[in-house]
């Protein structure tokens, strides 16, 4: 539905003279500068469209792949309440993926194409989901740190210049904030539990801290997309700015839990009024992005299997829609 008209807009542009293209671009940027939303049928530069497809589809893939590490603990959640909450959270993540795929479809790419990009390895998904969930405390650490980092990154996306993405993010952020609290509550229970439970919580923090900082992407000096995405108001803050905000809010939370952030260089800087933290191992980040993280292969295998095993559902749904369509035509 949303993609109607995109083709004709594209063709109009092909015929434009350089001066007309420049005028269209200037009008487009003026709209963005005036904080107006860009909607699917509006004219947009091809690079803006491509950037959004890349970011939104990768975001959708991350949500769907992100169901796997936590889904791994549904059968082993320690109580019925924990199990019910975890099922709901994982289901929310599937839902976020669906809104985001729909938002990306408004830019003229199909869900099948996005899925092929994921399964072939052409599209990325968040590095964080290539780490294993070894204990129940990891479910707490994911909620607290991973959803915490996600919120920090995603609240500004509610003001993204592209309307469908911004609107999808409003609902997603509300749910993410609930997810973050349930994770923190698991960590609090463990941190105030037996010495063994506290050790489990500390061990989870030790393993998830640095990968959570990597979620914000490469340092600004190496981020190839940030400058342009900021001009287009897709991104409102740089990767390093968001990483710093996350550290500033999370360190006091760790102190409240009585847990220690695994960074000997971490300290409060009176002058800047921010926490200073030690160097991030960007070599590890690059290895994970290149497919060599602890769980990359397993995650993609699980998605491939789900895609193949779901083929009959997609075929049945298409056949059903076809029959309903025919009946509709006959009734008309
Ligand atoms: N992992 O120029 P840069 C969740 C890539 S899901 C993998 O800074 P950009 C949740 C980047 O794509 C969380 N790849 O890029 C779900 C680019 O490669 P390409 C997902 C990364 O786009 C379930 C290259 O590195 N959140 O919250 O300006 C349970 C250069 O980077 C990563 C989103 O997707 C990474 N960590 O900035 C719990 C949010 N970082 O595409 C929680 C939306 C960078 O050129 N996305 N890369 O091949 C964004 O805000 C931005 O895309 C990023 C990267 C900040 C991630």
Image: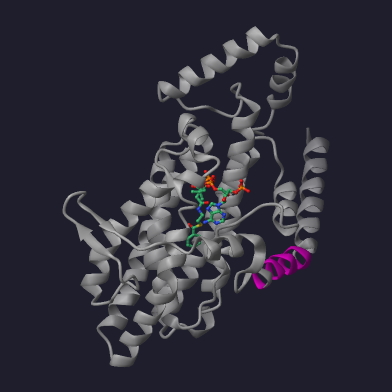
Residue 18 vs 133, above or below: the answer is: above
Q: Residue drawn at (83%, 41%), measured in percent from left and top?
A: 326
Numbered disc total: 0
Q: Residue drawn at (21%, 49%), measured in percent from left and top?
A: 272
Residue 52: x, y in percent?
58, 38
The image quarter in which residue 69 lies: bottom right
Q: Is residue 201 left or right of residue 304?
A: left
Q: Residue drawn at (41%, 84%), measured in percent from left and top?
A: 79
Residue 97 vs 312, above or below: the answer is: above
Q: Nearer the viewer, residue 32 or 167?
A: 32
Q: Is residue 2 left or right of residue 262?
A: right
Residue 5: x, y in percent?
69, 24
The image quarter in which residue 269 lies: bottom left
Whether residue 285 is visible: yes
Whether residue 162 is visible: no
Q: Quadrant of the N terminus?
A: top right
Please tell me whether the stretch drawn in magenta is mainly helix, strand or loop: helix
Q: Residue drawn at (69%, 35%), measured in percent from left and top?
A: 108
Residue 146 magenta-highlighted: no
Q: Nearer the viewer, residue 130 or 77?
A: 130
For the record, the magenta segment spans 298-309
User: Furthest residue to the left?
Assistant: 270
Q: Quadrant of the C terminus?
A: top right
Residue 256 vs 124, above or below: the answer is: below
Residue 21: x, y in percent?
64, 13
Residue 58: x, y in percent?
60, 51
The image quarter in which residue 287 lies: bottom right
Q: Nearer the viewer, residue 320 or 203?
A: 203
Q: Is residue 144 left or right of residue 131?
A: left
Colouring: one colour
């Amino acid at each position: 539905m949303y993609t109607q008209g995109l083709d004709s807009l594209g063709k109009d542009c092909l015929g434009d003279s350089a001066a007309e293209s420049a005028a269209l671009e200037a009008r487009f940027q003026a709209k963005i500068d005036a904080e107006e939303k860009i909607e699917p049928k509006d004219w947009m530069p091809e690079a803006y469209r491509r950037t959004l497809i890349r970011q939104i589809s990768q975001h959708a893939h991350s949500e769907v792949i992100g169901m796997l590490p936590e889904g791994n603990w549904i059968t082993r959640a320690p109580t019925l309440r924990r199990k019910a909450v975890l099922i709901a959270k994982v289901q929310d993540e599937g839902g976020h993926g669906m809104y985001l795929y729909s938002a990306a479809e408004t830019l003229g790419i199909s869900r099948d194409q996005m899925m092929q990009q994921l399964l072939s390895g052409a599209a990325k998904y968040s590095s964080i989901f290539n780490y294993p969930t070894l204990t129940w405390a990891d479910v707490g650490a994911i909620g607290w740190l991973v959803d915490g980092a996600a919120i920090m990154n995603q609240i500004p996306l509610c003001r993204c210049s592209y309307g469908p993405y911004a609107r999808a993010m409003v609902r997603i952020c509300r749910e993410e904030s609930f997810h973050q609290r349930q994770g923190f509550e698991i960590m609090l229970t463990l941190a105030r539990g037996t010495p063994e439970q506290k050790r489990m919580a500390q061990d989870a923090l030790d393993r998830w801290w640095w990968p959570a900082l990597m979620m914000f992407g490469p340092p600004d000096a190496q981020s190839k997309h940030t400058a342009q995405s900021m001009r287009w108001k897709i991104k409102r803050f740089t990767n390093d700015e968001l990483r710093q905000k996350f550290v500033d809010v999370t360190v006091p939370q760790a102190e409240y839990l009585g847990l220690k952030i695994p960074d000997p260089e971490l300290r409060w800087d009176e002058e800047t009024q921010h926490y200073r933290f030690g160097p991030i191992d960007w070599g590890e980040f690059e290895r994970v992005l290149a497919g060599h993280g602890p769980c990359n292969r397993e995650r993609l295998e699980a998605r491939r299997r789900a895609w193949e095993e779901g083929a009959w559902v997609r075929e049945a749904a298409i056949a059903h829609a076809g029959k309903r369509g025919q009946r509709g035509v006959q009734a008309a």
